[in-house]
Image (cartoon, grey):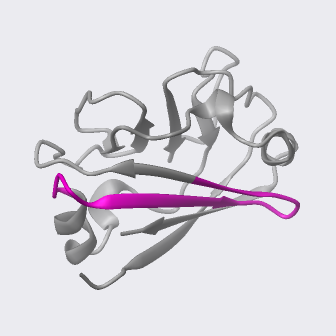
């Protein structure tokens, strides 16, 4: 299988806490509250349906290993998980990366090896300061 990469940009936000134990999320929403402890990026310039068709097809395959690279000015982290045929990949604003097998329109990846609370603290610190977040999807 050919490796595909797709990158997009989101922003950090002062209300990012990155405390959620089972997911992390990137959203197109510009504002979040402190209760949104899974959100690590706001103001994304991409939604799920904007992803290239070949990438969406690969993500919908159960055996596809998906790697997510998160990068800020001072830190980077790598998360691994899997695709699934039940992923509709059609939510208009949110991308959720889950440790569980749960799927819905917002889910991009299941069985992830990290959630928001597991991300590198240097990365979270940058995001809380509003730094730019580069998200790269690798399949």
Q: Is residue 64 above or below residue 139?
A: above
Question: In this picture, is 54 found above or below 67?
Answer: below
Q: Is residue 69 magenta?
A: yes
Q: Is residue 121 above or below residue 58?
A: above
Task: Tell me: 115 left or right of 56.
Answer: right
Residue 106, by quadrant, is top left
The quarter of the picture where residue 129 lies is: top right
Count every numbered label the image shows and give the total: 0
Question: What x and y, as percent, mark residue 120?
Answer: 77, 43
Looking at the rendering, the stretch of residues picked out in magenta corresponds to: 60-78
Asked whether 29 or 123 is in front, the reply is 123
Check if residue 75 falls in the magenta segment: yes
In the displayed structure image, the side of residue 110 where residue 34 appears, left or right = right
Q: Relative to residue 46, is residue 26 depicted above or below? A: above
Residue drawn at (82%, 39%) of the image: 121
User: Residue at image x 37%, y 80%?
Assistant: 4
Residue 41 location in percent, x, y?
Answer: 62, 45
Percent position of residue 126, x then y: 85, 48
Image quadrant where one finds the N terminus: bottom left
Q: Please report the residue visible at 27 percent of the width from the left and 30 percent of the height from the top.
A: 101
State left or right for residue 44 relative to residue 108.
right
């Amino acid at each position: 299988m050919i490796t595909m990469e797709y990158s997009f940009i989101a922003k950090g936000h002062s209300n990012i806490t990155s405390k959620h134990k089972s997911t992390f999320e990137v959203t197109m929403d510009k504002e979040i509250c402190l209760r949104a402890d899974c959100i690590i990026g706001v103001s994304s310039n991409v939604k799920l349906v904007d992803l290239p068709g070949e990438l969406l097809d690969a993500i919908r395959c159960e055996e596809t290993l998906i790697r997510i690279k998160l990068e800020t000015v001072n830190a980077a982290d790598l998360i691994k998980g899997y695709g699934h045929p039940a992923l509709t990949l059609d939510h208009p604003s949110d991308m959720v990366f889950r440790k569980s097998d749960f799927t819905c329109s917002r889910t991009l990846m299941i069985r992830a090896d990290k959630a928001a609370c597991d991300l590198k603290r240097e990365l979270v610190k940058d995001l809380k300061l509003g730094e730019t977040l580069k998200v790269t999807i690798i399949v």
